[in-house]
Amino acid sequence: MARAFAELAAMPGVDGIQLTPGCQPTADFAARGTTRTHHGFTPRAFRTREVWADDGACLVASDSVHPPRADSPAAARFLDGRPTPILETMYPGYALGDGDALDDAMDRGLALAVDVSHLHIQRTQGCLGDRTLARVLDYDRIAEIHVSANDGRHDQHRPLAADSFGLAWARARLADVPVILECYFHRLTLAQRLAQIALIREGVSDVR
């Protein structure tokens, strides 16, 4: 965890780091600079095992979280008036995984982390229509934007390409919303990592 953080923090163009589950823990890990915590991140374990209680209570204090799986007890109760972290737009199989659920979240005025790769999956699986997509992209309570690429079938966290779904829209929001690159950097060379950052910054003078 400490080594991965140090490698990312030292890269030109990195203005902050999202701390997310998946790195092997490091004793006394301490983040430096601008960070955001996501889902079940903990510095003491690979991940927090339980993010949502069966009664719909959120058990973590991260900045943003995945909503519960659609077949979990929490899915029917996690919006029952409790304060929640920023909720990420998901894909079928999760709450907030289709257009109807996104409309409901926006009707409630919830703060959203819009993951454009997840919207791409919803589009290709036929559960996100043009009207709701336009509404999401124009929503005034977007608190984070997550970008990566996939084939429209599964969440793959692939590197971005110039024509990746949602990339141009994410670039246009850089001045006012944190944009988080979520492709798997551990699989990329340094040159490939720098190319990914440059792709997000292309034609834009400021990035968050």
Image (cartoon, helix red, strand yellow):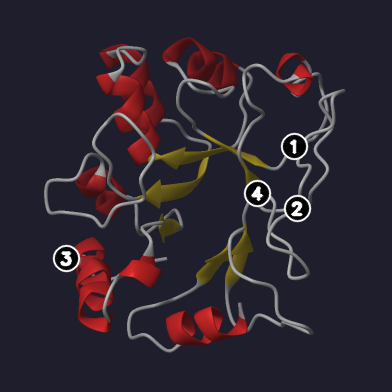
| Amino acid, disc 4 | His
Residue at which label 4 appears: 39
Q: Is mark 3 on a helix, strand or loop?
A: loop
Q: What element carries label 4?
A: loop
- Label disc, if present, on residue 84 of the rendered structure: 1
Residue at which label 3 appears: 202
Q: Quadrant of residue 111?
A: top right
Residue at which label 2 appears: 48
Q: Is residue 16 above or below residue 118?
A: below
Measuring from the top left, give residue 198's x and y in whole percent.
21, 71
Measuring from the top left, give residue 55's x and y in whole percent.
87, 23
In contact (CB < 8 Å): disc 4 and disc 2 = yes
Residue neighbourhood size for the residue with mark 4, other residues' Cα within 10 Å, grouped as few (<14), some (14–19), many (≥20)? many
In contact (CB < 8 Å): disc 3 and disc 4 = no
What residue is rendered at 24% in x and 48% in y? 167
Which one is earlier in the sequence, the residue at label 4 or at label 2?
Answer: 4
Which one is earlier in the sequence, the residue at label 1 or at label 2?
Answer: 2
Which one is earlier in the sequence, the residue at label 3 or at label 4?
Answer: 4
Measuring from the top left, give residue 51's x and y in whole percent.
76, 41
